[in-house]
Amino acid sequence: MVRGRCVRIRTHPIIDFPKRKQLSFCFQKKRLVGEEGDTIASALHAAGIRTLTTSLKYDNPRGFFCGIGKCSSCLMRVNGIPNVRICIAPLKEGICVEMQDKLARLPVAEFFGEPTKTLDFDVLVVGAGPAGLCAALESASRNAPVLLVDENQCLGGQLVKQTHKFFGSREERAGTRGIDIAKDLECELHRLQREGKIQVMTDATVIGYYESKNRHRFGVVKRCEYKSRLYDVRCKAVILACGAMENMLLFPGNDLPGVYGAGAVQTLMNVYGVKPGDRVLMVGAGNVGLIVSYQLLQAGIMVDRVVEAAPVIGGYHVHAAKLRRCGVPIFTSHSIKEVYGDEKVEGAIVVKLDEQWKPVKGSEEDVPCDTICLAVGLTPSTRLLSQIGVDLEFIPEAGGYVALHDESMQTSVRGVYVAGDASGIEEASTAMIEGKIAGLAAAMQLGRIRKKNLLVQYQNQLSQLRAGPFGEKPRIAKEKIAKHVEIGHV
Amino acid sequence: MKRKSDVVIIGGGVNGCSIAYNLAKKGLDVVLFEKNYLAAGATGACGAGIRQQWSTRENALLAIQSVKIFERLNRILGQDIEFRQGGYLIAVHDSQGMEQAKKNVTMQRSLGLKVNILQPEEIPKVAAILDVNGMRVIGATFCPTDGHANPFKTTFAYAHAARNYGAEINTHTSVVGLKVAGKAIRTVVTDKGTIHTDVVVNAAGIDSKEIAKMAKVNLPLKPFRKEIMATERLAPLFEAMVISFKDGIYFSQQKEGQIVGGIPIPEETEGYKTMPTFAFLQHMSQTLTRYAPVLKHVNLLRHWTGFYDVTPDARPILGVVKDVKGFIQCNGFSGHGFMISPMVSKLLTDLIAEGKTSEVLESLSLDRFKGKVTEKELSVVG
Ligand SMILES: Cc1cc2nc3c(=O)[nH]c(=O)nc-3n(C[C@H](O)[C@H](O)[C@H](O)COP(=O)(O)OP(=O)(O)OC[C@H]3O[C@@H](n4cnc5c(N)ncnc54)[C@H](O)[C@@H]3O)c2cc1C
Ligand SMILES: Cc1cc2nc3c(=O)[nH]c(=O)nc-3n(C[C@H](O)[C@H](O)[C@H](O)COP(=O)(O)OP(=O)(O)OC[C@H]3O[C@@H](n4cnc5c(N)ncnc54)[C@H](O)[C@@H]3O)c2cc1C
Ligand code: FES
């Protein structure tokens, strides 16, 4: 077992991390203490435990990577139940957490299952990030009963970790911090919840799409105390706002504990108040890489440098300038060659790239660090869309395969809508408007509202947001999508 | 892409690829077309169980001889196909079932197969996770040399070896037409060009019916959607494939640790349906955990569908057809075309390369459906 010196963040310029109730739990037969609101992963990390499992084939130590339940590199045994994704499993008093001996052994305890339950709603919204929240609010306030489902314990998707002030248009709350936008949306949601217009299911995963005669039908697994219950959910319209998945890079040592996705680093420090490490090497100088670097500094963590393979910085220059002012160098045309360390990250070799993006011999530099943060882009989550059978197209500017959709965010399958990063990687501001459009269009399809002018208004807002120089990539992506749709219609 | 070849094979499943291998090894000029990627059809969807315990003599013979080949296949093809012999345990639930089981066992033993009839209390000795009461059994049959393999690796290994012998394998190429003149095959039309040949092997799985239509041949094939699932990976629990003809369930644990299995949903009807059903989730998990209650703790990870290409007697259609010379059938496997592929490809290779026919090929030709009633395979699962 490897123990680092990671600790809790107590003072922070933006976020308040009050001391919370202590929860004691058992890890490998030892007693550890975490805090109320922790996931098992954040509690273990705060206790200095980075190695969670070993790889099946080569016995390599493994830590977590995505921190949001998407990569299964954090499977452990909790209260005898194997294969629990501890990065999204809430910490509870008295639980017993164990490392699995590679493949899971089954518990001897009796299993108390609960029977499958059927639910029927007008609209199902998958994902409660900015896109899903806005979609749910829009449909529900037009009197279309909504079920909103998210895998995480808390609502807000990526917003809950974004402590910086947002860019974008005034209407979409530019200048407001992501965490505050999430709070506002949640407030509105609770109001509609009290009115009985929305039902919210957190800690629940939409697992699949199933054959059905005249409705859309999904299976949803709701976790409760590390057990689960299956729901048979039927709906007339569905809005898929499942967000995106972090990209991985290929290099030797990329599976060492301490190599994290930017999302995981952000989650750990901004949501749970736990330092991911003491000295970080950031890979990627897009907005995510720049912002997370700055947030690391705010949390009192040293950022050695930012390396970026492209010859230019991809993100906003204000973010880059802020970093430089704090003394963090940004090396463009540089990449990571390998990461080394015994059981955990101890350093990395970075290398300069030539015009052909090939490593320049002799330019290797050894960078001692305990954390590698990968901010190398996102890929839209299209698994459910693909299973439903909507038309998908590979569009590099959108981040990979995306669902073709029309101006009302409807895909090639009637009643199936998409919004936010799932429809192409972009930003929270545009995700929110796309969510509103999808929510409104779904309500219109169900005959709850007829006036089209609001829809047009939202669509105009979206074009305005994409008008600037940083809107170029999504603009190209959306133009390509429109072209494919047009060809399909002819 | 070649413009001319001795044989054209349509379909890059396990059967198409193993025939390509066997023919190329004999020195024939072989071209294979697969409209998608290799193993994209039933092969990539299947449970890949290998069972010798059949009710008809032909199937039992084909399977027994195929197992002999599977046992040597790693060495022959030079790649690991993950063939494992954990045995097949067939649950028997009532006296009628036992009567049929005894009949089957007698026939199987006459072919030299080692098969045992087990008492209920002997069942957990084969697979400790099984609950005899939950299974509602009065006994079982068990053949220790049955097993399973990895269908992808098997297909890829055949294709690789076939290429080494000079076969041309074209993926992402669809056959869109067949040209017949003077009652014989002349040309195959694909979406990437045409090719001249005297022999075409129709190994296109459920699409074989469409292919046959291109030569004005009617195949009595019906599509049935079959659902199958895989659980998360677990430490080794049991080695046998467990099946029941009455409940329709089959399941086994793979080398990587996941449990793979399927069951037909009671309300299933024929048709080209591909969407998974919620009913399967429930029916499979209820039956599986009735058989092995400890699996209640396990998460299902994936669930997908594939087609059985079902014939009226649940036996494959192999060999020549009367009206079109050179048009060889290799389809209608009715849910068990993986396990007999080594022998099927050998028999068809003998037929194509040397004009040699056999008792099995004769009895499985398309002609058998004309007029007289044929013996139906009863030991069908899934
Ligand atoms: C570091 C960083 C900085 C950023 N800064 C800005 C900025 O300044 N301005 C800006 O506008 N944008 C910014 N963004 C981008 C913005 O956060 C995202 O574009 C936005 O969150 C996308 O919203 P979404 O609703 O599509 O997806 P997400 O916020 O990712 O939400 C998707 C949700 O769906 C859930 N989910 C997925 N699949 C399932 C399933 N099968 N069942 C149940 N739930 C599921 C997920 O758990 C998740 O909670 C930033 C992003 C990052 C990472
Ligand atoms: C759920 C399930 C479980 C099963 N379990 C077992 C089992 O345990 N044991 C067992 O022995 N069998 C099992 N089977 C049956 C077995 O999978 C099949 O019988 C066997 O794989 C058939 O192989 P094949 O090569 O004949 O056909 P396929 O694998 O279906 O290959 C046919 C190929 O032809 C291609 N094709 C179709 N049309 C064209 C065209 N026009 N041009 C070019 N290419 C074309 C298709 O893309 C496909 O790849 C199962 C089947 C299913 C669906
Ligand atoms: S699933 Fe837990 S770290 Fe990715």
Image: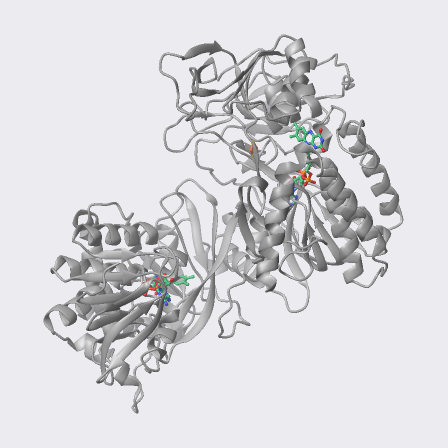
Q: Is residue B57 left or right of residue A182?
A: left
Quick check: can you spot residue A34?
no
Image quadrant of ligand 3 equals: top right
Quick check: can you spot residue A108?
yes
Viewer-proximal residue among A399 and B377? A399
Relative image position of residue A110 (x, y in whole percent)? 57, 45
Viewer-proximal residue among B171 and B85? B171
Residue A278 picture quarter? top right
**Which residue lies most toward the bottom here?**
B371
**Which residue lies most toward the top here?**
A327
Viewer-proximal residue among B187 and B275? B187
* Residue drawn at 31 percent across, 64 percent down: B193
Q: Which corner quadrant holds the C terminus of chain A?
A: bottom right
Residue A412 picture quarter? bottom right
Relative image position of residue B37 (x, y in whole percent)? 37, 55
Relative image position of residue B375 (x, y in whole percent)? 30, 82
Q: In this view, does A337 lie to the left or right of B345?
A: right
* Residue drawn at 37 percent across, 57 percent down: B172
Q: In this view, does A452 lie above or below B62?
A: above
* Residue drawn at 49 percent across, 16 percent down: A2
